[in-house]
Image: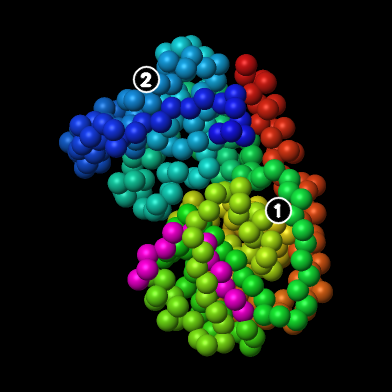
Amino acid sequence: MNKYPQWTFNVLNLANEPIKARYLSLLNKITRGSEKIVPLSFIAPFAKNKAYKWQLRKAKAAKADCYIAHNLGALPVSVNAAKFLRTKCGFDAEDYHRYEVSDLEYHPDVILNRYLEDKYIPQLDYLTGSSPLIAASYSELFKLPCTCILNVFNKTNNRLYSHHTRALKLFWFSQTIGINRGIETIIKALNLTKNRFEFHLLGTVDQKYAKALTFLVNSKSRLYFHAPMMPDDIFEFATQFDIGLASEPGFSMNNNYALSNKIFTYVQAGLAVVASNTPAQKHLLDQNNDIGMLYKNNDAKHLADVLDTYYGNRPLLYQHSINAFNLGQSELNWEKESRKFMDIISSII
């Protein structure tokens, strides 16, 4: 927080409050299994957010001019705090939450998330979405404006590298390295390529899963795991690689509609982007087809062909890297995207 000394924040440290920790854990377990017994109107905020009551108390005490929620568990907090103080509130939908886990209408998470959205979103003073498809979906669903504000980052001054002869380095990162992230398709593609690659993954990983992935890679390519790091450090770290992989498998409507911060990190770091053709990623790459290439979702052979194309055409790889970096400096950055956000805030306060 030293970077923003004017900011204040509250932290619920359950380690120092063991009784409260046990109470909240029990409350969460009870509410998560009680939807058919207790009406959702009583338990929904607690079922989604075990610290709901504590957060609401702190939010009210802040006496803010505008309360902004960035996840579905915080949405009731923002709306109810704003209602209590007769002030404004907004929600940044970073996912299409009702179908975040599953597309099945009777899945418990779908039922809970749908209830929270239907109850609280109509009470907002503004709504934003983190991708064009998420914003369009919410706008159509609730018949109200939903502005797309991309999860982009501040401009960087990263150095561009030119790699002409060596094995190409691929980069993928997330908080967690695990199944249902498209990683297995990448491994299969590496085994089908005609050339030698390095595949670098950054994030928390279960050692059994790491060993399983390592076992799957043939001797032609190499696999490397890197420990998590502070978000601001990832940009400089990423500049040592050539290609950033956005391998969303499209397992849910949200996964198809979302634009992860991977792509925007790759752009700021000056990496060529190779992305699965989920609707959201295809929309972005269709508009900016000179920063990377798409591959057919879950199609290892097509991904292998894309990687081999870059391996054999280094000028194309370098040009896409330059284009990606320049796009990050000119369009896909927070300096530009934040103007839309500030316009919204100015209009309601």
Instruction: Farthest residue to the top: give it.
Output: 86
Position of the C terminus, as image quadrant, is: top right
Residue 75 appearing in the image: yes
Q: Secondary structure at mark 1?
A: helix
* Residue in the picture at 72% in, 76% down: 310
Residue 302 appearing in the image: no
> In the image, is 49 to the left or to the right of 316?
left
Q: Where is mark 1, residue-wise?
A: 268
* Residue in the picture at 80% in, 54% down: 326
Which one is earlier in the sequence, the residue at label 2 or at label 1? Answer: 2
Q: Where is mark 2, residue-wise?
A: 57
* Residue in the picture at 39% in, 76% down: 212
Q: Amino acid at mark 1?
A: Gln
Report x, y in % for residue 316: 79, 72
Front residue of 233 and 89:
233
Q: What is the span of residues highlighted in magenta in the rendered image?
A: 197-208
Q: Is residue 284 magenta?
A: no
Instruction: Farthest residue to the front: give it.
Output: 2
**Residue neighbourhood size for the residue with mark 1, other residues' Cα within 10 Å, grouped as few (<14), some (14–19), many (≥20):** many
**What's the CA distance linking mark 2 and mark 1?**
39 Å
Report x, y in % for residue 240: 68, 65
Q: Secondary structure at mark 2?
A: helix
Position of the N terminus, as image quadrant, is: top right
